[in-house]
């Protein structure tokens, strides 16, 4: 496989904390299964997620005969934040996925946004909230208020990251911001 | 809330239906006790004006300033007293009773049913239980979710969105475990789909200009590109419905339905300074060809007038 030239490749990023569904979302919309660097997740709590990404996911979407959209999923672990500016250089935009069932969703949200703003200033992004149907405490209003406090107004969609159509809808919203 | 309703001169068959209607009011947190009226104070007196005792009770109640609801076969309503059709079903009676006992909770600003209930509860941090016969949904505005016991129940609620027989009431905070037995979906996605389904019956919002104060949650209406386009335009600037329909070349009723859905969810507000269509048409700049190609792959046209 040819490695795309970083500065000329059309890139779309998926970012967010561990377990938010980045690999699943990429799998849902990409032409090929993502090349993942998943390893067994030692903190797994017995749920369906048994592995986690320790470098990044990569896959492609063929746009036409000449162009390919390169899709990257950045790792969720904070100690791998250094990869974001390297992988994200020249990206069209980012999809930030958050896990509504996580007790630290708001902290994750703030951290991910700050990290995006640090690594790629001015990069447009949208937010996808996964597992909202499993999280009775989840409040869309609180999330909107959190972003308002950060002077941000971005689309926030609750999605099922396994559903291709819903992930596509989120990417469409991102494209409408560009 | 405990309510005492007196009954005077009402036939047994009507009283039975009235009793059923009172039972339905439990969904609106109204505990209604129905009893034969013997001149004692009560919150409402229900009388049959076709009955002599009913007419006498009505006169006495009026002198004592007790609100009266009349069953009457005679159409003219010269005395201004609220009336109810003696052939009305229990659900309809319940709605009339609720409107008398809790004014404003059953129908709001031109829309009835579940849509009216959602509109009335904008900004409410409490959970609202809405019932229509055997259908029950929990609306959580703050969370942006709607819950039901099954997806088919949500679909049934969608089908009866504007039905006037919905009853509602605030629901005490539930144990989180209760939600394990309920399915849920995004409230905005539900409203967008439901309003689209009933677009022909919705009043036209063609007076004011409207603008989105935030993006609605459209993740659950994944195949609906039109709603996404409307959201993008309404988030950028204020629009009047006819101009927006003309600009997007969509059916006015469809645009109106989207406005209703986002208005009821609390995302839309009226704005006094609408953008001129001429400005809007030129607002999106020509997008780079790469972006256009990416957008085309995802089913969008960017750099044209409609996005």
Image (cartoon, rainbow, N blue to C red):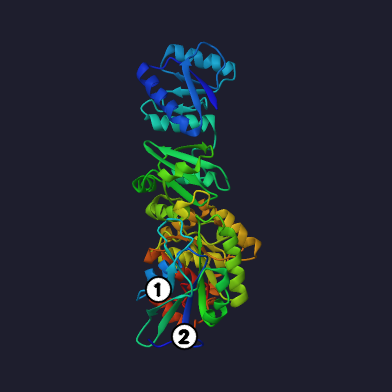
Q: Is residue A129 visible?
A: yes
Q: Is residue B166 visible?
A: no
Q: Are marks 2 and 1 in contact (CB under 8 Å)?
A: no
Q: Position of residue B104 (x, y in %)?
A: 54, 37
Horizontal arrangement in the rendering, residue B3 relative to residue A39 (left or right): right
Label tally = 2
Element marked by disc 1: loop
Task: Name the residue rendered at 57%, 76% in the picture.
Answer: A123
Disc 1: CA contacts within 10 A as few (<14), some (14-19) or many (>=20)? some
Horizontal arrangement in the rendering, residue B64 relative to residue B293 (left or right): right
- In front: A178, or A128? A128
Element marked by disc 2: loop
- CA separation, marks 2 and 1? 18 Å
Compared with B190, A7 (above or below) is below
The residue singled out by tag 2 in the image is A9
Name the chain under label 1: B
Horizontal arrangement in the rendering, residue B6 relative to residue B85 (left or right): right
User: In front of the other: label 2 or label 1?
Assistant: 2
Disc 2: CA contacts within 10 A as few (<14), some (14-19) or many (>=20)? some
Compared with A79, B94 (above or below) is above
Q: Where is residue A145 in the image (x, y as percent from the top left)?
A: 61, 57
Name the chain under label 2: A
Residue A81 in which image quadrant: bottom right
Q: Position of residue A124 (x, y in %)?
A: 55, 73
Q: Which numbered circle lies on residue A31?
A: none
- In front: B134, or B274? B134
Q: Position of residue A12 (x, y in %)?
A: 47, 76
Residue B114 in which image quadrant: top left
Instruction: Assign the N terminus of chain B to one quadrant of the image.
Output: top right
The residue singled out by tag 1 in the image is B298
Q: Are marks 2 and 1 on the same chain?
A: no
């Amino acid at each position: 496989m040819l490695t795309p030239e970083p500065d000329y490749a059309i890139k779309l990023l998926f970012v967010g904390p561990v377990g938010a569904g980045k690999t699943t979302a990429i799998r849902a919309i990409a032409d090929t299964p993502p090349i993942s660097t998943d390893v067994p997740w030692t903190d797994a709590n017995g749920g369906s997620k048994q592995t986690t990404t320790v470098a990044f996911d990569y896959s492609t979407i063929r746009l036409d005969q000449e162009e390919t959209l390169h899709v990257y999923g950045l790792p969720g672990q904070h100690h791998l934040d250094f990869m974001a500016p390297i992988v994200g250089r020249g990206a069209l935009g980012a999809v930030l996925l958050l896990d509504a069932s996580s007790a630290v969703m708001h902290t994750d949200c703030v951290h991910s946004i700050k990290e995006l703003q640090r690594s790629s200033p001015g990069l447009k992004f949208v937010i996808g909230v996964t597992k909202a149907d499993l999280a009775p405490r989840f409040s869309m209003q609180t999330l909107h208020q959190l972003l308002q406090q950060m002077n941000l107004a971005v689309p926030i969609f609750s999605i099922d990251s396994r559903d291709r159509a819903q992930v596509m809808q989120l990417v469409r919203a991102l494209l409408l911001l560009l | 809330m405990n309510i005492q309703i007196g009954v005077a001169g009402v036939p047994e068959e009507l009283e039975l239906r009235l009793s059923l209607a009172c039972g339905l009011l439990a969904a609106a947190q109204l505990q209604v006790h129905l009893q034969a009226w013997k001149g004692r104070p009560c919150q409402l007196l229900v009388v049959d004006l076709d009955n002599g005792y009913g007419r006498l009770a009505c006169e006495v109640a009026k002198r004592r300033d007790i609100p009266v609801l009349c069953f009457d076969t005679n159409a003219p309503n010269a005395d201004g007293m609220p009336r109810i059709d003696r052939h009305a079903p229990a659900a309809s009676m319940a709605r009339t009773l609720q409107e008398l006992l809790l004014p404003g909770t059953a129908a709001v600003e031109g829309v009835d049913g579940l849509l009216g209930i959602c509109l009335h509860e904008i900004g409410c941090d409490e959970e609202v239980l809405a019932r229509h016969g055997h259908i029950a949904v929990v609306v959580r505005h703050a969370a942006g979710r709607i819950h039901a016991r099954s997806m088919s129940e949500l679909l049934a609620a969608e089908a009866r969105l504007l039905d006037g027989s919905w009853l509602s009431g605030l629901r005490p905070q539930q144990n989180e475990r209760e939600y394990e037995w309920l399915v849920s979906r995004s409230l905005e996605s539900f409203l967008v789909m439901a309003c689209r389904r009933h677009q022909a019956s919705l009043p036209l919002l063609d007076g004011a200009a409207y603008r989105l104060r935030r993006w609605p949650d459209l993740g659950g209406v994944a195949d609906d590109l039109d709603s996404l386009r409307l959201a993008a335009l309404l988030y950028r600037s204020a629009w009047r419905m006819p101009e927006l329909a003309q600009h997007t070349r969509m059916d006015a009723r469809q645009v109106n339905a989207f406005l209703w859905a986002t208005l009821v969810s609390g995302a839309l507000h009226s704005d006094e300074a609408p953008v001129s269509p001429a400005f809007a048409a030129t607002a999106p700049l020509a997008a780079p060809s790469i972006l256009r190609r990416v957008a085309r792959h995802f089913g969008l046209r960017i750099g044209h007038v409609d996005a």
